[in-house]
Image (spheres, helix red, strand yellow):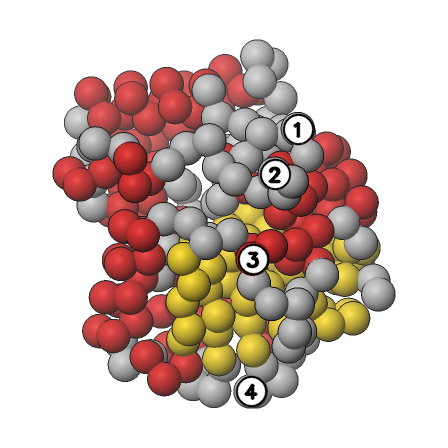
Amino acid sequence: MNKEQSRFDFDSNPKFQTIDYAVAARNFVPGYESIFDMAVALLDASVSEQAHLLIVAAGGGMELTTFGKAQPQWYMTGVDPSAKMLAIAQEKVAEHGLTNRVKLHQGLTHELPLTPLYDAATCILAMHFLPDDGAKLSLLQSISQRLKRGAKLILVDLCEEKGSQRFNDFLTAYKYHARNLGMSPEVVEEAASNVIHINCISEQRTIELLQEANFSKITQFFTALWFKGWIATKNT
């Protein structure tokens, strides 16, 4: 049985309807928009003008719209298990005139066909929802199996050892950052509580999983508190 399934379900979250996801993400993730700008720059250096990209956890639409506006000939396939998140993505795709270049699938990455292979992939701010009981590795392997040899993966995740002093220091800074940008104390405390129970792992463990999933040349390009970003290359 494939373990690629999040324990957190956006569709069953009763508070999701009241959340502006784009605003919340910008307020809770330092440097949020720069992640996607850097991803475009890194991928532009390694794929063709008419590349076909796999966007994992495409709900919300940030990758789709940022990449689509920056690169007018990239084609993108987005996958996400959440119907609500995909609805947001679909609305943004239509709003930016990208319908002809974007195909969306509700479901999990391992459910996608194994062909055709993609020129690159992204998995941004999603893997920390999965436990490290085989689910994280399963996701990375599912991505790897759908990439061409030498293709790039952009992975951005929340990475830190729970219970460490640095984790606690980052949690304090995380809450201050969100409050300073206008998030209410109640929302901030709820988000902090979710972080405490989220399935984050260390940087070292993340790199180990990438290597086990057949990726190499793993280079970190982003860090902001406990949010880290890497670009990696599929081996074979």
Specify whether residue 183 is in view: no
Dot 4 falls on a residue whose secondary structure is loop
Contact (Cβ within 8 Å) of mark 2 with mark 1: yes
> From the viewer's perspective, is residue 8 above or below residue 42?
above
Q: Nearer the viewer, residue 82 or 95?
A: 82
Q: Which residue is mark 3?
A: 111
Quarter the C terminus occupies:
bottom right
Apparent side of residue 111 relative to residue 101 in the rendered image (left or right) = right
Q: CA distance from mark 3 to mark 2?
A: 12 Å
Tell me which amino acid carries mark 1. Answer: Asp
Residue occupied by mark 2: 3
Q: CA distance from mark 3 to mark 1?
A: 20 Å
In contact (CB < 8 Å): disc 3 and disc 4: no
Q: Tell me the crowding category of disc 4: few under 14, some 14 to 19, or many 20 or more residues within 10 angstroms, Cα based.
A: few
Q: Earlier in the sequence, mark 4 or mark 1?
A: 4
Label 1, on which residue?
A: 133
Spatial distance from mark 4 to mark 2, Cα to Cα?
33 Å
> Label 2's element?
loop
**Badge 3: few (under 14), some or many (20 or more) residues near its Cα, within 10 Å?**
few
Front: mark 4 or 2: 2
Residue appearing at x 41%, y 81% in the figure: 101
Residue marked by disc 4: 50
Q: Earlier in the sequence, mark 2 or mark 1?
A: 2
Residue 17 point in image, percent of width and height: 17, 41
